[in-house]
Image: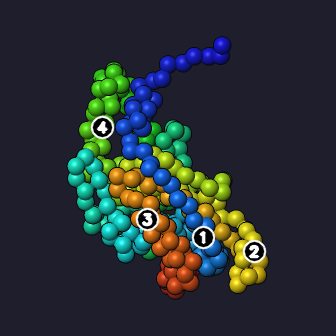
């Protein structure tokens, strides 16, 4: 028969929260040639700069939303807003089924180095905050013992724009470098961008097969906010930015590529 175990109250709150969260209406994927971006990362590695693919994609996605304000919107309850800053919500590795997140506020006005430094600095903090939250729910979650009460409270909060921005920013990104395609399906913003691993693939260039580094980007959208064409516009704009040599160069200030000074 196997072993049986009751869900503790932290797990019950998490389950009810997921049931109240918006579900994706569809998902779309696009393959991106990251040759130019890979050159940037290699140059940064030589100079011992701690920048990863994730940081570059945060930068690129925030630029797309800043340049296309009609795509940058949130709906909660009966209210819709176009936020005045792009706040990227990045999932961080954690122990629970829903991982902790770092919210990079005003990401479009931060260069890739500032983004990388903020993620590195804050990741341990949000993991610890998540651990304390779940410990508190295990201890005090019984105050609302019935699922209908927990879901009612969580549904009430999720219908408030301020709460959605607090827990999910204005756009969400999740990166899983161990798989080719990653499509997260539960979120609180217009869409969530899933990023798989960068791998070498044979692609056609001017009718000639060649090996290029490629990543598959998958965007899951909420049909109450975006339709399929809006998602397609976002993905193609993101591809154009990442494949652009201008983006790679703009992400690396010449002064920032110098080795860090030794204190």
Q: Which of marks 3 and 1 is in front?
A: 3
Gap in Å between the C-alphas at discs 2 and 1? 13 Å
Q: How crowded is mark 2: few (under 14 residues within 10 Å), some or many (20 or more)?
A: few
Circle 2 is placed at which residue position? 211
Residue at 32 percent of width and 29 percent of height: 150
Judge whether residue 2 can be spotted in this image. Answer: yes
Whether the residues at callouts 3 and 1 have beta carbons within 8 Å, the answer is no
The reply, left or right, for residue 138 in relation to residue 160 is: right
Label 4: which secondary element: helix
**How many marks do you count on the picture?**
4
Whether the residues at callouts 4 and 1 have beta carbons within 8 Å, the answer is no
Label 2: which secondary element: strand
Judge whether residue 114 can be spotted in this image. Answer: no
Gap in Å between the C-alphas at discs 3 and 1? 18 Å
Circle 1 is placed at which residue position? 32
The reply, left or right, for residue 68 in relation to residue 50 is: left
Gap in Å between the C-alphas at discs 4 and 3? 29 Å
Q: In this view, which residue lies farthest toward the right?
A: 209
Residue at 70 percent of width and 84 percent of height: 206
Residue 248 is situated, as x and y percent measured from the top left of the image, at: 54, 80
Circle 3 is placed at which residue position? 229
Circle 4 is placed at which residue position? 155
The N terminus: image quadrant:
top right
Against 108, is 20 above or below?
Answer: above
The reply, left or right, for residue 3 in relation to residue 140 is: right
């Amino acid at each position: 028969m196997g072993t049986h175990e009751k869900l503790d109250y932290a797990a019950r709150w998490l389950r009810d929260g997921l049931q109240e969260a918006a579900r994706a209406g569809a998902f779309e994927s696009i393959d991106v040639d990251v040759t130019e971006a890979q050159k940037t990362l290699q140059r940064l590695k030589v100079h011992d700069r701690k920048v990863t693919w994730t940081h570059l994609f945060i930068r690129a996605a925030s630029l797309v939303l800043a340049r296309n304000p009609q795509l940058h919107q949130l709906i909660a309850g009966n209210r819709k807003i176009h936020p005045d800053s792009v706040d990227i919500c990045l999932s961080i590795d954690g122990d629970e089924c829903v991982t902790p997140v770092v919210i990079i506020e005003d990401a479009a006005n931060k260069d890739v180095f500032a983004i990388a430094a903020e993620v590195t600095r804050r990741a341990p903090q949000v993991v610890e905050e998540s651990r304390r939250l779940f410990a508190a729910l295990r201890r005090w979650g019984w105050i609302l013992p019935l699922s209908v009460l927990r879901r009612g409270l969580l549904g009430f909060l999720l219908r408030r724009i301020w709460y959605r921005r607090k827990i999910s920013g204005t756009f969400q990104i999740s990166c899983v470098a161990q798989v080719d395609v990653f499509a997260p399906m539960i979120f609180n913003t217009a869409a969530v961008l899933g990023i798989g691993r960068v791998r070498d693939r044979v692609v056609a260039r001017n009718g000639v097969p060649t090996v290029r580094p490629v990543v598959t980007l998958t965007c899951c959208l909420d049909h109450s906010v975006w339709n399929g064409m809006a998602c397609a516009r976002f993905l193609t704009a993101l591809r154009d930015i990442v494949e652009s040599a201008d983006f790679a160069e703009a992400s690396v200030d010449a002064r920032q590529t110098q080795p860090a000074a030794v204190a």
